[in-house]
Amino acid sequence: MARWNWGRVSVLPFTILVHLVGILCVALVLVWMIHFRGGLAWSTSNQILIFNIHPVLMIVCFIFLSSEAIVHFKSAPGSKFYKKTIHSALNAIALTGAIVGVAAVFKFHKELGIANLYSLHAWLGMLTIILFGLQWMSGFLVFLFPRGAKKTRGRVLPWHVFVGLLVYIAAISSAESGIVELVALLQGRNAMGKFSPEARLANCLGLSLLLLGALVVLSSVLSSPSPATKPEDAIAIPSP
């Protein structure tokens, strides 16, 4: 049976699109939270500004930077060690930003007396962050430092790739559910018109995130190793 040769399809155009769509997502969430929602602040009497930190960090760090980390190993120039180091660093920053983003929404809830972790969005988001952290730590130890034996790396790699892709898809899903939850809340309180520019922007952000996720997954498929490629050199999913 003939098999499709992914190696004949260049990953470069899709990598460029990942960068562009990622920047678009960052721009949209910044316009939404700063222009429409009033800005960002960690300590203020207007608790809404504290909440606004959450979607910004989750998309800028957790989504955009982790997307960049995924495509970096395939497309960036430099030695394998350099690529793995940058790959790991981007994921570490993404994880740190996500933790601060969660801390912001917890602070917002505490100051307003709102319960935590009651929605599907919250459950999915927390599970994603925990898995992301475990994925990053295991990848760092096995593939970068102190680095496992070749046999160990070969055994871990399929699980590393599967869990990494699963975590990334979960992150996109969590962001989408967060947008739906926020828009429903604002429209339920008549703070956002159903056909207002803000509502359209939120919808565009959701579609852009979906497109970004599809492009990143496609880039990961296209960067699958050829038979001559060493398994440990083919990592292109979150964690080094």
Image (cartoon, grey):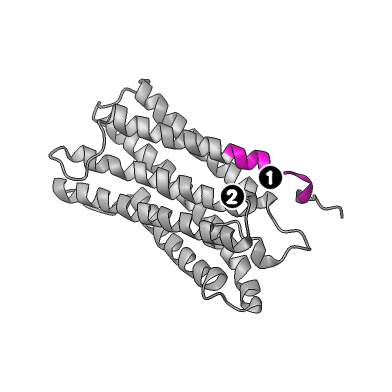
Which of 96 and 120 lies nearest the eye of the viewer? Answer: 96
Residue at 74% x, 63% y: name it: 229
The C terminus lies in quadrant: bottom right
Residue 128 locus on image (x, y percent): 43, 57
Residue 162 locus on image (x, y percent): 58, 61
**Where residue 71 is drawn, which disc sits there?**
2
The earlier-in-sequence mark between 2 and 1 is 1
Left or right: residue 161 compared with residue 140:
right
Q: Please, what secondary structure does the residue beneath circle 1 have?
A: loop
Q: Residue placed farthest to the front in the image? A: 78
Residue 110 locus on image (x, y percent): 17, 51
Identity of the amino acid at label 2? Val
Residue at 56% x, 56% y: name it: 165
| Residues shaded magenta | 7-17
Left or right: residue 130 compared with residue 148:
left
Residue that badge 1 annotates: 11
